[in-house]
């Protein structure tokens, strides 16, 4: 069974990528990609504070778009269950979903219930519709699907009917059903409107795309988030799999070892995490061994600003 990364055009499985990469020889041997145990990950995982509260969350979370949209009897459910189990045992907390991700919310809710670890996770989901009552109804549906009566973070997805839904989210926070308020975007064409909302609304979180392939949010949005004291979740840190396709067959630069980087996935994630405004990254991951690889990006040294610029220059030269 092949687990494919989402993207445009021919898709490359992460296994195929690793097998074809000179830098990744032996990474699929027994013991996983990094050789780190979940206990070692949990002990070493960096945590960063949410500016508005001081609460700390691990820097590596998990996104559920596309790959968690499976039917209840799909054989992949067992793999996803093992992946979420690995995530929590490895010290992960933030699980991001949306009612627009097909069955992803229901799958996460079912698996967390079976594992019995809902109380160890930080659930972030979204309102992604138009109209006040439609948003209220969607939140109820999300709670039912995720088998919970509260969300750690509720976000307005792609700033759709933002003022209306922020009103709903604030009311839910007053009722103790939501802890943090946020907005999301993953398209550069919405950045200007997104920035205006950031400037006018007292938000706890933003969620934005930021990667080696899409670094533009660092021009204005990430500095603005830091100035406003907003936590930042990074979506699409692998640019929907495009980064793996470009890196196929290419070696990591030897200086990647200077910031404890052992794989391209870690290189990509450490780039995103190295921006001082970023709180956590939420890569989509659907196999335990890839989860371990991703989470290892949160362990050890991080690139400084000079090294991050070097990473981007190296990437552009490939």
Image (spheres, rainbow, N blue to C red):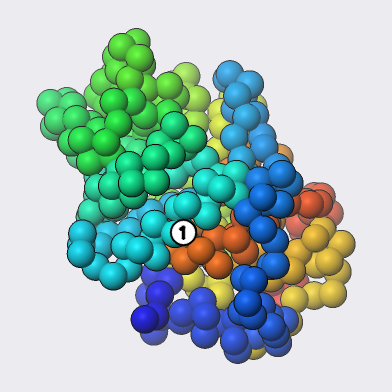
- For label 1, the crowd category at 10 Å Cα-Cα, with few meaning under 14, some 14 to 19 and many 20 or more, is many
Q: Residue at x 87, y 62 (%)?
A: 258
Mark 1, secondary structure of its residue: helix
Residue 191 to residue 22: above or below: above
Residue 223 in view, yes or no: no
Q: Quadrant of the C terminus?
A: bottom right
Q: Nearer the viewer, residue 279 or 36?
A: 36
Residue 161 to residue 39: above or below: above
Residue 301 in view, yes or no: yes
Q: Residue at x 70, y 85 (%)?
A: 25
Residue 166 placement: quadrant: top left
In the displayed structure image, the side of residue 71 where residue 276 appears, left or right: right
Q: Quadrant of the N terminus?
A: bottom left
Q: Residue 316: x and y, percent?
A: 68, 73
What residue is disc 1 on?
Answer: 83
In the displayed structure image, the side of residue 9 where residue 253 appears, left or right: right
């Amino acid at each position: 069974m092949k687990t494919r990364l989402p993207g445009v055009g021919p898709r490359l499985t992460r296994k195929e990528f690793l097998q074809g990469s000179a830098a990744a020889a032996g990474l699929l041997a027994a013991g996983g990609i990094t050789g780190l145990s979940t206990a070692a990950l949990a002990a070493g995982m960096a945590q960063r504070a949410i500016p508005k509260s001081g609460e700390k969350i691990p820097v590596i979370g998990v996104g559920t778009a596309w790959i968690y949209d499976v039917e209840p009897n799909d054989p992949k459910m067992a793999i996803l269950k093992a992946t979420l189990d690995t995530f929590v045992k490895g010290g992960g907390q933030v699980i991001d979903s949306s009612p627009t991700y097909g069955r992803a919310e229901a799958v996460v809710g079912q698996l967390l219930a079976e594992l019995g670890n809902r109380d160890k996770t930080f659930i972030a989901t979204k309102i992604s519709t138009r109209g006040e009552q439609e948003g209220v109804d969607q939140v109820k549906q999300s709670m039912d699907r995720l088998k919970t009566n509260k969300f750690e973070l509720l976000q307005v997805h792609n700033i759709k009917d933002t003022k209306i839904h922020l009103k709903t989210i604030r009311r839910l926070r007053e009722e103790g059903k939501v802890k943090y308020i946020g907005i999301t975007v993953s398209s550069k064409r919405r950045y200007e409107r997104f920035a205006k909302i950031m400037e006018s609304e007292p938000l706890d979180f933003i969620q934005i795309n930021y990667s080696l392939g899409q670094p533009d949010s660092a021009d204005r949005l990430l500095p603005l988030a830091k100035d406003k004291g907003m936590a930042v979740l990074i979506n699409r840190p692998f640019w929907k799999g495009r980064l793996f396709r470009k890196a196929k067959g290419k070696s990591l630069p030897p200086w990647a070892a200077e910031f404890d980087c052992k794989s391209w996935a870690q290189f990509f994630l450490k780039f995103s995490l190295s921006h001082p405004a970023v709180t956590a990254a939420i890569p989509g991951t659907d196999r335990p061994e890839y989860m371990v690889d991703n989470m290892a990006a949160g362990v050890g040294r991080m690139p400084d600003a000079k090294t991050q610029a070097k990473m981007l220059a190296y990437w552009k030269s490939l």
